[in-house]
Image: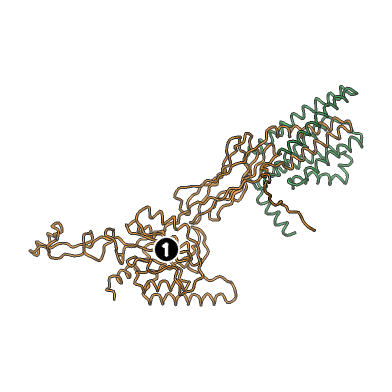
Amino acid sequence: MIKFVSRSKQVVARATVLPFLVRIGIAVSGLVAVYVAWPLDIASGPYGALLGLSALYPAVAPRGRAATLAALVVVAGWLVDTVGFDARVALWRVLTIATTLYLGHTLTALAAVLPYDAVVNLDVVGTWLARALVVVLISAVLTVVALGLATDLAGDAFLIATLAGLAGAVGATLLLARLIRRA
Amino acid sequence: MRLRNAVPPGEAGERPEKTWVPTRALGRSVLLTGLLLVLGVALGRVDLVLLAAPFAIGAAIGLRRMPTSVPELTIDADEEHLVEGGHVQANVTVSNPDIIPYDLVVVRTRTSRWLKLEHADRPFAITVPSDGWAAVDLPGDALRWGRQEVGPAAARVAACGGLLACRPVVMPPRAVRVYPVTEPFNAIEAMPAAAGLVGNHRSRRMGEGGELAGVRPFAPGDRLRRIDWRVSLRTRDLHVASTLSDRDAEVLLLLDVLGEVGLSGGVAGSASVLDTTVRAAAAIAEHYLQRGDRVSLLEHGATARRLRPATGRRQYLRVLEWLLDVRPDPVEWDTDESVFGVHHVSSDALVMVLSPLIDPRAADMLAHLTQSGRYVVAVDTLPEGAAPAGTGPLSPLATRLWRLERENVLGRLREHGVPVVAWAGAGSLDLVLRDVARMAAAPRG
């Protein structure tokens, strides 16, 4: 315990601003995603603190599997709310969850390779965030268009369009898997 | 239970290790994309597909071009004449030979404790453009003489938005030459024995030179320009001014490196024995080389390194270079054996032994040199307040006994005719050199 306290003091003393802000970003993204995804009844109940901890953990240990688990908790919450509680699929919630999930993911990827005590050039974080914002913007446009179509084309025609889109997405996944083997 | 090796043993024909490896972020991207798409298909939910979209788009943008080359790392440092206490500028450069930029390069460097470089104890995070380079500057001060190392340096690179990472690239250290600061030293006394034909020292012999030795009657062979007309007119007989010939001399600096005593605090802190030895040797060598003498150096240690006698500016630079490699070099031989033969020391050379005089073998060596007729001066390099290691209850008593024993050795050396003087910078050797020169002038039996 004494060792842990002295180690923590050392970490706090050596920590630098930008890596700390990156971790703050991970924590904020995780908290927003988890509390938007889960139903209000559960999030405000006794399990709310556990959900918060699962969202904060990747900020503390970005190199482990915590970020994957936190993302799965968010997805689980979204399914519980929409399937279990029959909540309406609102555009703002899909947009917020998709954006914060991705921001948390990419900031965790940055924090995993960025030591907490590093002297960081501003362009490192700036370039990283700019690329993430481009991805988020493209996804947001796609989300707005797709959900708009879903409202207009409710029925069989939409089901076919969805299936075709899914087939493309599966193709993308296979492509990713191939890229991993090449890397 | 038999555990599997963390790193499998190498086999013949094994494929080379991949430089670029997927990160956990890529695995997370693939997992979430796949899972959300499967759920979207299974549940017929387009919102789940849209949640997967940023991960798929991010991965597609990141991996559209992938790195193939290994990043290159170089360490640069000042090559100018750097003296301890001076400013040093080191930098670590990361080159990117690839066609895609490096999103993040984390550079870590270790440096010698005697180089106080800014932020050298922290990792640096930078970006490197494609087919370009970026450098991490490490300005600072050199605190102590020697070959101080910058490095090893290691760089870990993340590319493709953090989806791929390079295995760490490590660069071996680079030595920065930090020359000793030369404490001011000035000896105006004559050399005990000048050997060469030319030089700056007045010799003990008459001859062509600049130093007036006296006035004597004219004799056949004297040059006319030597006639002292004032004395000749007064005495009504021709007199000439006789001069002492100018000669050079050889100075051998013998460095006792049998052990190190005291803690070095760098140029601004306390001086250890080797600090004093090296700085004093540099100062003495500079002084005599500027006067045109030949200076050689010899180590009294296991390897007995030697620098041949020579003169001039080039020799001074060689001396400084040679001094950079001085380090404790203890030996296990008995006191009867000697690390070098006395015949290696020129009979005309002035031997300056820089020693803390705590090892009986050093005292024996001094006595041996004196008995063989060499002109020896012992320069005591033991720092003030030095004491043997140990903090037991009997330490003060042991220290006192140790000091008494050392005083006894010094007294015996003086009895043998070895002048011992503590190094104190300017003029510290004048009195001793005068005594040595006087002894040298006396007829040898």
User: Is A7 in front, or is A109?
Assistant: A109
Quarter of the rendering containing residue A135 = top right
Does A73 sit left or right of B94 as displayed? right
Number of disc labels: 1
Q: Which residue is mark 1?
A: B298
Quarter of the rendering containing residue B282 = bottom left
* Outermost residue to the front: B12
User: Which chain contains the residue that carries disc 1?
Assistant: B
Q: Position of residue B20 (x, y in %)?
A: 67, 41
Q: Amino acid at mark 1?
A: Leu
Residue name at image x 43 percent, y 73 percent? B363
Q: Could you tell me which secondary element the residue under label 1 belongs to?
A: strand
User: Is B189 in front, or is B340?
Assistant: B340
Q: How is the image coloured?
A: by chain
Q: Position of residue B222 (x, y in %)?
A: 14, 61
State which chain is coloured orange: B
Does B195 sit left or right of B132 as displayed? left
Does B420 sit left or right of A143 as displayed? left
Q: 10 Å neighbourhood of mark 1: few (<14), some, or many (≥20)? A: many
Residue name at image x 71 percent, y 44 percent? A112
* Outermost residue to the left: B236
Q: Position of residue B27 (x, y in %)?
A: 76, 40
Q: Dividing the image into 4 quarters, which one contains the N terminus of chain B?
A: bottom right
User: Is B310 in front, or is A2?
Assistant: B310
Q: Position of residue A183 (x, y in %)?
A: 70, 39
State which chain is coloured green: A
Q: Dividing the image into 4 quarters, which one contains the C terminus of chain B?
A: bottom left
Above or below, B365 relative to B184? below
Does B108 sit left or right of B58 as displayed? left
Residue name at image x 75 percent, y 32 percent? B57
Quarter of the rendering containing residue A99 = top right
